[in-house]
Amino acid sequence: MASATSYLLFLSIFSSVLALEAAQPRQSNINLESSLHPSTNPTSWLSPNGRFAIGFYPEGSGYFVGIWFVTSDENTTIIWTAERDGPPVSKDAVLKLTSGGLELEGRSISQFSMDSYASSASMLDSGNFVIYGSNLEIIWQTFDIPTDTIVAGQMLPPRSELISSISETNHSSGKFRLEMQHDANLVLYPMGTLDDPEDAYWSTNTGENPNLNLSLHFSNDGRLYLLGHNFTRNITTAYQSKPTLVYRATLDIDGRFKLYSHDFKSNATEVLAEFPDSADQCKVKGTCGSNSYCSSAAGPAVCSCLPGFYFLDANRTSNGCTRNFTGDGCSLNYDRVMQNMSTLENLVWVIRYGAPDSITNKEDCKKKCLEECKCDAALFNNNTCSMLKFPLEYGYEDENDATTTFIKVVTISPEGGRQSPAAVPITAMKKKFRTKIWIVSLAIIAGLSCTVDVFALFIYRSHRMLGRNRELGLVDEIAPRCFSYHELREATDDFKEQLGKGAFGTVFKGSLSNGERAIAVKRLERMVDEGEREFQTEMRTIGRTHHKNLVRLLGFCDEGPNKLLVYECMSNGSLADLIFKTKRRLYWDDRVRIALDVARGILYLHEECDTRIIHCDIKPQNILMDDNWTAKLSDFGLAKLLTPSQTRTFTCIRGTRGYLAPEWHKNAPITVKADVYSFGIVLLEIVCCRKNMELEAEVDAIVLLDWVSQCFASGELEKLISDEVDMTELDRLVKVGLWCTQSEPALRPAMKNVVMMLEGNIEVSLPPRPDSSS
Ligand SMILES: *[C@@H]1O[C@H](CO)[C@@H](O)[C@H](O)[C@H]1NC(C)=O
Ligand SMILES: *[C@@H]1O[C@H](CO)[C@@H](O)[C@H](O)[C@H]1NC(C)=O
Ligand SMILES: *[C@@H]1O[C@H](CO)[C@@H](O)[C@H](O)[C@H]1NC(C)=O
Ligand SMILES: *[C@@H]1O[C@H](CO)[C@@H](O)[C@H](O)[C@H]1NC(C)=O
Ligand SMILES: *[C@@H]1O[C@H](CO)[C@@H](O)[C@H](O)[C@H]1NC(C)=O
Ligand SMILES: *[C@@H]1O[C@H](CO)[C@@H](O)[C@H](O)[C@H]1NC(C)=O
Ligand SMILES: *[C@@H]1O[C@H](CO)[C@@H](O)[C@H](O)[C@H]1NC(C)=O
Ligand SMILES: *[C@@H]1O[C@H](CO)[C@@H](O)[C@H](O)[C@H]1NC(C)=O
Ligand SMILES: *[C@@H]1O[C@H](CO)[C@@H](O)[C@H](O)[C@H]1NC(C)=O
Ligand SMILES: *[C@@H]1O[C@H](CO)[C@@H](O)[C@H](O)[C@H]1NC(C)=O
């Protein structure tokens, strides 16, 4: 009723807009089997007031599905995009509403919780597209999964974020994020950062009390405010509440969170507020990348490289700068290398690794850094000298800042002297690395050939045995079984005892065969409804994996939306409990053994099972311990069920922050090397028995990877551990961890080599320093 009335109301007020959109049907209700096409009408479904539409819009070489509002004849503002990091679809694509939700090219782009099917959908006047279940309850809405914009009436709950777009014409994930943090702060960060205060460039400073559970709300009169159960804080004042006004708040491509109003009467768009409000773009961290600095004296922000550095991409000067050699000043060969200090004035930096020095004189500060091989740069301000290492970050020019920056410039002379061991050009470095691996592999094949033969024989035997079993009809013992929902309900006593909750759903305790066999039943909750075939294919893939270091899938249930997985029960909890929670440290030998268990499990997924599986979410919480304290990986093979297809970028799940490889933030393709990175982080956690982020630690030690790199570079590994360990082994494990966490995926070793290095079967070469190019 209400929508019909408003429809009439807006019909009279906005006849002009109506005339414009006459070709498109306005629908308060979209029925099942309705569809849209990019090139033939209808291309979109309009809201009853005619302002918002969902449908295809052109971008790049094709079309995306999104929601926009029409601001003038030829102008629209996109407020939401489906699968923004995927490729565009062609002009022949079809968007259809089915009982499984919104289907694009036959793939679902909406996810439901279990036991619900769609019955209809609606593009609401607020700008929210909702899908209704059979009782007209909302089972999915675009308001829950914002991209870079929220509109009046929408909110941002705790632990959610907006991510800016790349550009006006490319709505893929860009460079900045606005996070409604669990700790009650609303914070702006550059992408690819942890929630580290040093990376933040704006915050509401409301995080004194993490119990507040704040959400960001947006009222119809354009007021942005934070609300918790006993707390409110206005971020903007109230403006007008007029039927002709539409408000939106967007994290813009320049990293500013801006409140816009659009008046449908005057066709005027205005910026009412922006955060941070300073006009100086250079204070937005991430405007210029690593090893460059930002100046805005002449108007718009300009990025410049540090002396001795050049742009990673000359056409995108905001992406940061690099040098074309790697090398540590500590092992440079002075025959070919010239080092010089270059001076810059009035630059402000974030100091991450700085070691303050007792020097109080500018010339001494410069001289000390030149002599100190570990020093890459020095800052001198107010009679204080700080020594820094690359990368330098978030630098900007400020006329009023009296800091002097000294940068150590290394020049490698083209001829004369012998090759310096450390300052090797990057291309040569890679080649050397590859050759080394080759030699090592050959050595191993030669040296272990008898073992290899025995192993090959063993594989051959077990294959034959498998074949015989099949003939005898014992294959049921191996393949996962199909359970009915009823059976699993009984086995878990109506899902009574919850064991845990993960990215994919809730895990319940259960038992089979009258209590003889303990099981864990996982109820999938966030799954893309890919249809029966995809799920069963995936179950078969997972079911075929058999490895001592993988949690075994015993069976599954696939009854419509009821999708459940049955696993063997792991009695001794997760690795996270073991290394982060227990009082007594695990013995060193156990830590080494567990690291190897995990590495072997990943190696199997990557290289030894029929279908290569990328885990995507390796972390201690997903590594479980069985009765014998053998570590086993869980949750593998599920990432694919959450994503449209392996080739697309993952949009629904992006692993877990802290364990994510840098390429997740760069829209680069995700390969097995992303798992290698996560493993590297887990390995360092196992070695040091601490989490990858520890806010209570000393400044240098907060981010584990930085801390380990630093201790490794300075030869002070003993700082990392507080118990008795074998120093040779420690050195080896740390080196492996540093290789695995290289930001360039190609530099990370394959899991096969990781296992060999951990086993001590191959020498681990010196890992490159993690900075200079990143
Ligand atoms: C958007 O930018 C990303 C990163 O540069 C690129 O991979 C993608 O193809 C672009 N998308 C479109 C539609 O141009
Ligand atoms: C379209 O909208 C953008 C962003 O609001 C604005 O900058 C531009 O001037 C508009 N163009 C036209 C033709 O109205
Ligand atoms: C926190 O707020 C969100 C959104 O308002 C709500 O869904 C959630 O239940 C709240 N959590 C607690 C523990 O109050
Ligand atoms: C709000 O509630 C939390 C938890 O109940 C309490 O710790 C806090 O002091 C309260 N804040 C205010 C402003 O009353
Ligand atoms: C926030 O703004 C609203 C509307 O202007 C006002 O009624 C309310 O008192 C303000 N709240 C605070 C805490 O200032
Ligand atoms: C607003 O835009 C509509 C459609 O583009 C146009 O017909 C109308 O004249 C414009 N109104 C004003 C006040 O510019
Ligand atoms: C940079 O832009 C120029 C001109 O548009 C083009 O010729 C060149 O190939 C681009 N370089 C890179 C590295 O993309
Ligand atoms: C490094 O880059 C500079 C400038 O691009 C070039 O002149 C120099 O030859 C390069 N050095 C090596 C070792 O490639
Ligand atoms: C090093 O700096 C000094 C003083 O700025 C300058 O005279 C000298 O030429 C520089 N050397 C090199 C190799 O750049
Ligand atoms: C300079 O350092 C002194 C002593 O550490 C300190 O008291 C003073 O506030 C500093 N001045 C500035 C401008 O930072």
Image: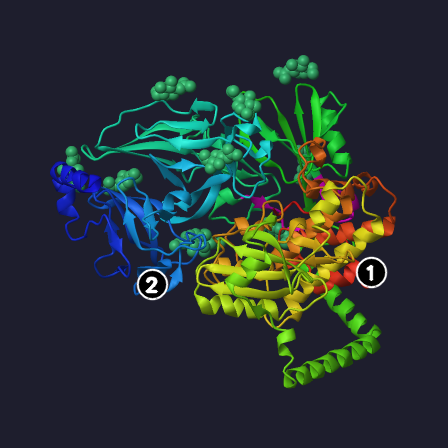
Rendered-image quadrant of the N terminus: top left
Q: Is residue 553 above or below residue 49?
A: below
Mark 1 residue type: Gly
Asked if the stretch drawn in magenta spans residue 211, the answer is: no
* Residue located 45% across and 60% down the image: 644
Marker disc for residue 90: 2
Asked whether residue 322 is drawn in magenta, I would say yes
Measured from the top left, where is residue 679 in percent x and y? 68, 54
Q: Is mark 2 within 8 Å of ligand 1?
A: no
Secondary structure beneath dot 2 equals loop
Tell me where residue 225 sits by quadrant.
top left
Give the secondary structure at mark 1: loop
The residue that disc 1 covers is 760
Stretch in magenta? 320-339
Ligand 9 - quadrant of the structure image: top right
Earlier sequence position, callout 2 versus callout 1 = 2
* Residues tagged 2 and 1 counted as in contact (Cβ below 8 A): no
Residue at (50%, 60%) from the top-left corner? Answer: 563
Q: Is residue 114 visible?
A: yes
Mark 2 is on which residue type? Ser
Along the horizontal axis of the image, is 517 left or right of 160? right
| Count of picture labels | 2
User: Which of 85/288 is in front?
Assistant: 85
Residue 206 lies, with reference to residue 442, above or below; the image says: above
For residue 116, above or below residue 234: below
